Every structure is written in structure tokens, then in C-alpha cells.
Amino acid sequence: MADQPPQPPSGPDAPDKEKMEQIRRRRMEKLTGSASSSTDKISGAGAEASTSLPTSQAPAPKDNASSAQPVAKSAIDIKPTSVTPTPAANPFAKLGAQASSTEKPLSVRTDPSQNVLGKRSRTESDMQTPPRPAPSTRKPNPLEESLEDYENRILAHIFRITLDPNQRTDSSNHKLIFLPELRKELEEEHAEIRLSADKLDGALMEACSTIPHSKPVFDYLLPCWKRIIKASKGLRGYAGQKDAILKEAKRLCMSNCIFAAEMPDIFQREINLTTDLLTPYFLLEPGEDKGICPDFLEEAVARFAEDDMAKSMIVKAFVGMSSKLSNMTMNDVYKPYVHAFKLLTQFNPITTAIAESPLFQMAVSANTIEKYTLLGPFFRISPLQQEVTREYFGAPKTIDRRHIATSQDALRLTLQTHQKDLLDIINHFVRASPIAKSKTLDWFAYIVNQNHKRRALQVDPKEVSSDGFMHNVTVVLDGLCEPFMDTTFSKISKIDIDYLRRAPRVDIKDETKLNADEKASEKYYEATVDGTSNFISEVFFLTLAAHHYGSEALNATHKSLEKDIKYIQKQLTAIEAERVKVARDPRAVAVLDLRIKRVNDVLENAMSKRMAIEGVLSDKPMQAKSLIFMRYVTVWLLRIATESDYTPSKTIKLPLPSTPPAAFDYLPEYVLEDIITNFNFIIRFIPDVMISAVGDEIIALSITFLTNSEYIKNPYLKAKLVSLLFAGTWPVYHRTKGVLGDVLMGSKFANDHLLHALLKFYIECESTGAHTQFYDKFNIRYEIFQVIKCVWPNDIYRQRLSQESKTNTDFFLRFVNLLLNDATFVLDEALTKFPKIHDLQVELRREAEQSSMTAEEREQKETALREAEGQAQSYMQLTNETLAMMKLFSSTLSASFTMKEIVNRVAAMLNYTLDTITGSKSTNLKVENLEKYQFRPRAFLSDFVEIYINLGVHEPFVEAVARDGRSYKPENFDSASRILTRYGLKSAEDLNAWELLKTRFKVAKEIEDQDEQDLGEIPDEFLDPISADLMEDPVMLPTSKEVVDRGTISALLLGDQRDPYNRDPLKIEDVIPVPELAEKIRLWKEEIKERKRAERATVAAAAADAASKDPMDLSA
């Protein structure tokens, strides 16, 4: 109520008997529909009653009756007052009162309340001191109080009304509303002047009509409701008719609240969206006088079945909350909205009503979901909102790490609470009713289906939902999955793969499939499957999609931000350098200053966003739940691929059948991709979460699909499996082998299959089909090397590899060939960069002393030096890794390195490199700060010598080294011996082995030279046309009909399985032996050797004869 009484109404707002009668009749038609807490539907505001309603006797009230159970209805005879007092004659007119119709006594209905009201902010002392029309202030004795006195007192106290024109306040100084119309009606009826439940309807009509139109009627009615609830709870034991009075007061108070929201014209008020909504009152604490409490909602819900207006009142209030929240951020006071929503969802009918509202989903595009759906604004609240990132991470270039960490912690805690509230809300939606569950799942599906563009190479924020919104969606869906994600995977069988063929909510039509093209995929999914998908399947596939377009897209955004920030920083540095050059030109400086400001703003926004994303994604409890979900996806995917009941406690038999199950082929690629990216992110940024949750299933996933790589079409997706293993073996904290290293060392499944799987993919990644495949393979192979080095100390791996190399020689020959190719390339690229670096450094040092170059020439030299240094660093890193692998494998797989198809190339590569680092060219390798390039010549030489020693146990290798006419130089081996001895790079045992090997090389060289001399001119028909060497095993190529040596063509086919003459496909099994030519070569060689042996025998005999004669007389 206003502090000052309003002026009497005039004009259209003045009391009008005919109009009031019409409004009254319309209103009473609604009130007479039910004697329970629920009311019949109320007719439209424009409806008019033309006849009086008949009167009937109402049944006696039933105590403790449920508010949801209707009792007998009673008709009401409306008898309007015959006289409308003028403002002058009516004291209440000064308060702006309006005339009200009167009615005959109503039946009293019972409606017990069940919920407990929140704590009140203040007490009502006037509950014990009811207002009295007489001036006496004597407190009545409750034991002697009659029902009529109690009724008068309690109604006056609850509704703050009075029939005494002289009493404007109660004993607690609360203002009272004088009801002149009701008093006049009682006087005309010669009734006692007191308040009663029979006349309460008219009293409330008159009281509500006094509220100024600028103020909501709810400001009056809601505190009345609270006083009713408090009075009801104050009754002890069975209260009989006193309780019935309060229930009638409660019923009528709710009815008038409904009218205030839905039919304000019944109080002669114009519709006003500001004052006719309950929205502001939901934002108050339930215990406050005007706050909405559970009792209020329970009473409203009890009327839903028969009164659409009760439902409309609540839904409209929620729509108002959602609308206001849509313009807020986490910086604003948003929690009252969330708390109010949580209160509403405690009532299943309200939750269902919200879901059924046409406004529940009004979005037409991805970027409108978070504003134009009822749930959207609640999911929009996030630390990733731009206003929040600016607030917490302003001036990101200057804030210190501690401030960043503190801000991230604060936002993370706030977000955790908010996401927990969101999950609680959604849990109520999916449990409220089938329709609410269905609508909620539809809403989530609309989100993921509309946000496919979030995974595009270039994302336009105007076309997709925001990062914060999508992240909240993902986390909430993770929470929905939590109940069925137990550690024993007991409910994983309930995830139905046929969901995707049963009119699924999730749209995967445009998604790339694991092992199928678009046309085949469409045909497969056109064949639908009957049945209904269960809730677990629905949520599982929704959560999978949410991860892909939500959290995993956010991971990708974080990764791209890192690159963007580095690029922008380079841009800014370049512009600032340019500004220095034009410092004397004010106009140029002004232009550059503007550019610097713009670029700096972009940089700071990107840095702030990255800090906020890192804070959100480093939430350990959230990531732990995400990891649990991804473990479930991993096990489920392996079950589909293996068509088994696999769990981490069971073993997969490899290799799998060459043809994958169709259900696996047509799964979207992101099922596997998101597992990998999720695990990779956690391993990199919060590995302690991974340590506590890692299981054998991630090892099984990687090894299975690297072994059966034909199951996955995308080579880069297969490469990510290697990246996952690599990330898992990277040292973390006290774990030198990373979070997966110990598992790999001890897992029997890994012991049996890991190395073969890695070497198989080492071979496959030679060709990825992309224009960057040449460089991609080095990155992939680098990661393969790291995983192998991690597990190499385990003897089981070495033994298994050695055994397989003896039975699968072709496989290991291909591997060694590619390893040799890589070693040859990276060694050549790395070692040829050092002479260039050496020359450039000498030139620039000379320039510093003599200043003979122009500024442009000097800049060109410096640029060339930087480029050469960068390339040398990259290639030297690859060289070191490749050399390390050759050391490992040459000790275990030495036979594979010395097969005839490849031994000559191995020897040539080793000899050439040894000549480079110990021969005359070695002086050009001396550059400033060798450590900068990770080039350590002494260690480099030691590794090469070890490879020589490892392979030297095989005679074909010794012969191949000696046969290398280009690079075999005994002096290089002697130089190596001196360096090894001088710097103590090898043990005495190794030095001894090295010296013996050198001797064997020399002997083999002598034999090779003698054989070459003996053979002399080789007939052309016996020469290999490719290598120009004598053929040992001539074969004919089936299509080109050319004859070459088997060893030569075998070596070529290791890299390219095509005929070198016509490029037709060719396998070594297809070549045709030429035994006639082989026999001719053999006979020719034997003939030559026999002739040479005879010649040497003749020479030896002659020498023996000469030696047997007397020595010459030298005295003469």
C-alpha cells in the first residue's frame, strides 16, 4: 500500500455499478466452478453474465482434505449492491476504493498445505492481537475466543482489512484497508459488522481494487499469502472450522493472484506487463513477504488440471525470468533466476508446463538458441562471455601469473556451482514427465544439429552458438550420463547401435564416416530399424555429439588461439619496428599508432579469451567426468569393432577380420577423434586427472586400430592414435614414462602387439595422400620413435621383435628400407646446412670488422642465416632420433639390415656419413654454438661406430662396406679410431671390436678388388641395366620384359611397387626368373675364376722355382 492515500478516482476509473456487476459476474463464474483448491477455467475477459446463478447448500467442510482432491461444488447467487456511495459519503473513497458487488454466503473448502515455508524476515506480532472495531485494547483470551471472533481477527490480520472507518492501523501500526462497500452491504443485510469467510471474496475484490494502477496487486496479495501459511502452521492439532477458514482464505488469495496475472481488468486495471507478472517475486527469497514460496506453487499446481490460467500465470512468470536473464552475464546478479528456476522444477507439472510452452524452443538458428529458447539463457551464463573475460583478465599483457590463477580459480568455482544447478534443473525435466523428457532431448538435439559449423576450419561466431553455452551443454549431458557409467561397464550393453538407424535425434548425415563414403553411408542409413531407442542410448549419442561440437571444439579454439596470439605478436612487433623507421614523419606515425592500437586490442582480446578458456578447461572434476564418459565411448567402440562383449578386463584377439562390421564403418569419425583429442588435452594440461583414471582400454584402442588400420579411412585420424600414445609416454611429474608408460611396460596385450602395430604404421605413413605427406611422415615417425624408446628397456619387447623378424622378413625389410631412406635424407639435409651456416657466419663476422656490405645485403645474409639455422635445428633433431632408432634396431634386428636387397645401401649411407664427419669435409661442420642445433659430433661419431659394430657380425655387411667404391676410405676409419681413443668415447671392448672390424673391411676390400680385376670387362648381357653391376639372379619384369637382377628390383620395389620402365604395378612375386641367363653368368664367372686361378698358380710356381735356385752372387 502507498504511504499516502491516493486521490479519489475520477473519469473512467470511477466506480460504475453496471460495469462492476459485469466484471463481478464474469469473475464469479470462475470461482463457482469448484469448491476445492482447483478452479474451473475462467472465461475470457470480455465475457458477460446475463443471469444470476442459482443458490445451493454447500456440504460441510472436510478437514485435512488434500488440495488436489475436489469436493462438492456450490453455486453462488450474486446480489449486487443497489447503491454506490459517492466519494464524499464513503470514507474509503479517499483511498481510491471502487464499488464491489456482494454475494450470499459461500461454502468453505479445505486445502491443507504440505510444504514448509522458508524463514520469514520478520514476525507478525498482530497474530496474537487482532484488530477490533471498538477502541478497547484488551487482549482477548484465546480460550474464550469464539469462532466468529477468531474469524474476524484472523482475516483482518491476514489481509490487513477493516470494517471500522476509524481504524486505519492495527496494533503493530500496519496500515489497514477500510472496506466501505462490504460494511454497507452488511448494514443493509442487518448482519453483524465483522469479517467472515462468507464475505471474503467481496472483501478481497474491494481491497484489490484500491491498489493504485502503478503498483502490482501482487505487492498486496503475496504478503497476505505468507500470513495465511504462517497462521495455518500455528494451529495445533485438529483445528476444525478455524482451519477451514484459513483454507478458504488461501483459496481466494490464490484465485485473486491468478486474476491479477491473467485478468487484471477484473480489478478495473489495464493490462500491464510490468505489473501483471510474478517474475520479480520469484527473484526474492522464498521467506520474504513478497517472495514465492513452495506452498504458493503447490496451491497453483493443484489447479493446473482444471484451470489453464493458473498454469499460464506460472509459465508467464518463468518466460519473464528467461527473457531478462538472456541479457545478463556472469558479471551480473544471475543467481536469483537460477534459484527460482530450481524451485519451479521441484514441481513436475510446472516443469511439464514449461516444456509444453510454445516458447520453449523458438530459435531459428544456432546463434539464437541461447536467447530465444526458455532454457537457453540459463546455459548462456559462463566465464567465456566476453564481458566476463574483460572483467577478470583485463590488460592481459601486464597481469601476473598469480592474478591469472586467482581469477581462473574464482571463475571455475562459480562455474562449477552454476553447472551443478543446470544439471539439477535438467534432471528434473527428464524425470518430470514423458513429454518434458522428450522436449528436453529435442532441445539438446537441436543444439548439436545446428552447430555443425563449429568444427569448420574457419568459424563465424555469428553462425554458431557461443563457446560458453556449448561447454555448459556438454557438461550437463556428461552429468546425465553419469548414473549409467559405472566402473564395471555393466550397463554398456544398453547403448544400442541401432539408435542411429531409428529416426535418431542426432543428425550425422553430413559427418565423415570412419570407413565409408557419403553415398554408401546414405544407402546404409536409409534402411531403418524398427523399435524405440531407450533413454541411455538417446543421452549417449547426444553427449557424443555435444563433446564434438562443444568441449572438443573449445579445445580446438584454445589450440588455434595459441597460434593466433603468436602470429599477432609478430605482426605487432613488425609494425612497431616500422614505426621507429618513420619516427620523423608525424602522419606516418599517426597511421601506424592507429594500427598498433587496433592490433593490440585484438591481441589482448585473444589473450584474455585464452586465459578464460584455460580456466574453464582446467576444471579437474569436470574433466574427470568427461574422461569417464570417454572411457565408456572407448569400450563401446571396441565392442562394435570386435563384435564382442569386450571390457578392459578382457583381451582382444588381433588381428581382427580384414572386413570391419558395417555398424562400425558407418559411425561418424568424431566418435574416435573426440576420444583421442579429449585424452590428449587432459594428458597435456591436467595429467594428474589421467593418472587416476587411465585404464587398459585406451591402450587397446590405439593398438587395435593401428594393427587393423584398414578399419579407419582417414590416415590423419590413425596418426592421432600414435600421438595419443606419444603424449601418454611424455614425462609427467615423477613419472619418467608418462601416464601410459608403465601400463605399456606391463600390459601383456601391449607386449604382444605394440611394436608390430607401430612399425606397421611407420610403413603406412609413407603416403598419407596429402600435399604435406613428405613432412607429415617425419612428425608421425618421430612420435613412433619416442614410444618405442619408452618401452625398449623391457626385454619382452626386444625378444618379441627379434622372433617376428625371423618369420616376417618382408615386413621388416620394408621397415628397414624406409628407416634407411629417412636416415639418408635427414642426415644429408642436416649436415649440408652446417657448411652454409659456417660460410654465412664467417661473412658476417668479416662484415662486422670491415663494413663492406650494404644494409640490404647484410639483411639478406642475416635472413639466410636464420633460415639455415632453423632448418639445421629441425633436421638435426630428426637425425638424432633416426640415428637412435638405428642403434636400437641394428642390435636386435641386425639380420634385417644386412639382407641382400638393402645391405649395399646401408653400407653406402654409413660410409658417406663417416666420410663427412671424419674426412676432409669435417672442417666445414664447425659453426658457432653447435649445441644450439643439438649437434654433438663426438656422440654422433660414437653412435655411428656402434651401428657398424652391431652390423659387423654379418659378413654380407662387411663385404658391402668394402664394395662401396664411392665412400669407403680406410683413412676415415683410422681417423675415427683416433677420436674415439682421444676422448674416451668407447670402452676398451668396443675399441677392440672396432679395430678387428677395420681389419676385416681391409681384407674384404682386397678380395673385392682382386675379384673385380679378375673379371675384367663384363659382357653387357650380364650387367644389370639399372645398377650396372654383374647380375647374380637375373629376372624378367612381366610387362616391360626387361631383365634385371632380383636384388636390384627388390630394393626398388621396397619404395615404389611399379615397374621402373613402364610404371605398371609390380610385386616381387610377379617377376620371372631367367635360369638360362643365370646359368650362363655362373659358367662365365667359373671360367674366368678358373683361368685366373691357373694364371696365379703358374706365377706362383715360377716364383717357387726361382726361389729354389742358388742365390745370385752379389760380390761381382
Image (cartoon, rainbow, N blue to C red):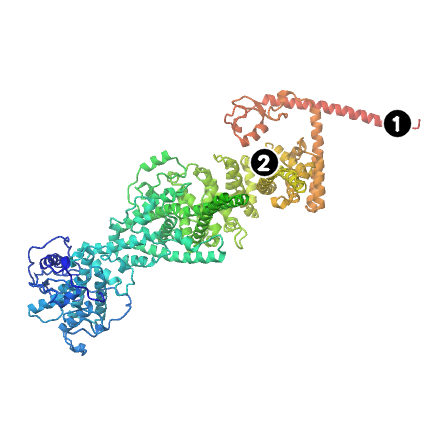
Quarter occupied by the N terminus = bottom left
Q: Secondary structure at mark 2?
A: helix
Residue at x 46% of width, y 39% of height: 716
Reading the image, the residue beneath label 2 is 825
Please, is residue 554 above or below residue 852 in the view? below
Three-letter amino acid code at the position of disc 1: Asp
Which disc number belongs to residue 1110?
1
Secondary structure state at the residue bearing disc 1: loop
Residue 1088, how many percent across, how many down? 69, 23
In which quadrant of the rendered image does the C terminus lie? Answer: top right
For the question of whether residue 559 can be seen, the reply is no
Mark 1 crowdedness (10 Å alpha carbons): few <14, some 14-19, many ≥20: few
- Mark 2–mark 1 Cα distance, whole angstroms, equals 64 Å
501 versus 1071 height, above or below: below
State the image coordinates of residue 174 (x, y, percent, origin top left).
22, 70
Which residue sits at x=36%, y=36%?
521
For residue 357, side relative to residue 453 (left or right): left
Q: Nearer the viewer, residue 925 or 1031?
A: 925
Please tell me whether mark 2 or mark 1 is closer to you in this view: 2
